[in-house]
Image (tube, rainbow, N blue to C red):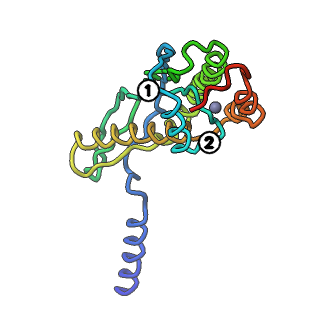
Amino acid sequence: MDKYRYFLAAIFCTIATVLPVDAQCPVHAGVKIIVDLKFGELRTVFDTNLKDLSALAIATGHEAHMPLRAVYSSDVLSTADIKEHVDRDGAGQFCASASLVQVHLSVQNRTIHVAKEIINESCLLKAATGHAEAHAHDEEVKIAAAETEITSRLKGALSRPLISNEDSDQAQAQLTTFVRKQIELYLNEIEARESESSKMIDSSASLENLRNACARENGIRP
Ligand SMILES: [Zn+2]
């Protein structure tokens, strides 16, 4: 009989240890996600030259763009305001859940850097800045479309509370770090993705047209 009781106790212990750690944390109604987007003004500056742009094209694997005469750059910044609450479950664990996450995405320093050599070459200038503007616009579309993806992915990632065995502050800090890292991860993935529209902008036909644009002024090479 004793042996039977031990056996039952052993089974019970096994079940208890394989249960999810957060089995006792209360699960609240879903988190609300708000994403706001801001795009800074697009500026054009003559702060580079053909030699540097050529070196940049080679260093970044954009040889197909050569001779590169203008390039677009920007900084995508993100911050998040998180409204959370921490519950304590029966086992003494601290369970942090987010009720609202407000993601602020801001595309700043949107700049087209143009080679000084073409400042007075109206045709080359128009062709080179036009191509860079297409990339700037493509980024706008890509980031605007990311709003839905970030919302649904964050909702999924935050559907269960995060647990700390230490204290309420640590549980909150853990949740904040988790949310920020998730947003960073999504943004990196979205930025690395080559959209259909960016493939069109950089299609071989389009780059060929760019290379052959402005035959009269085309003598200007790095
Ligand atoms: Zn391009």
Rendered image: mark on residue 163? none
Answer whether labels 2 and 1 touch (C-beta < 8 Å). no
Q: Amino acid at mark 2?
A: Glu
Q: Nearer the viewer, residue 156 or 127?
A: 127
Please provide percent x and percent y for residue 111.
49, 21
- Quarter holding the C terminus is top right
Q: Amino acid at mark 1?
A: Val
Front disc: 2 or 1? 2
Per the image, the residue denoted by label 1 is 103
Residue in the picture at 35% in, 28% down: 83
Dot 2 crowding, Cα within 10 Å, few <14, some 14–19, many 20+? some
Helix, strand or loop at label 1? It is strand
The answer to whether one can see residue 112 in this image is: no
Which sits earlier in the primary sequence, circle 2 or circle 1?
A: 2
- Quarter holding the N terminus is bottom left
Q: Give above or below for 17 relative to 183.
A: below
Please provide percent x and percent y for residue 221.
60, 30
Q: Give above or below for 143 relative to 175.
A: above
Per the image, the residue denoted by label 2 is 63
Dot 1 crowding, Cα within 10 Å, few <14, some 14–19, many 20+? many
Residue in the picture at 72% in, 19% down: 216
Q: For residue 215, which quarter of the picture?
A: top right
Which residue, as the protein is rendered here, is positioned at the far right? 205
Helix, strand or loop at label 2? It is helix
Q: For residue 108, which quarter of the picture?
A: top left
Distance between the Cα atoms at labels 2 and 1? 36 Å
Residue in the picture at 43% in, 65% down: 18
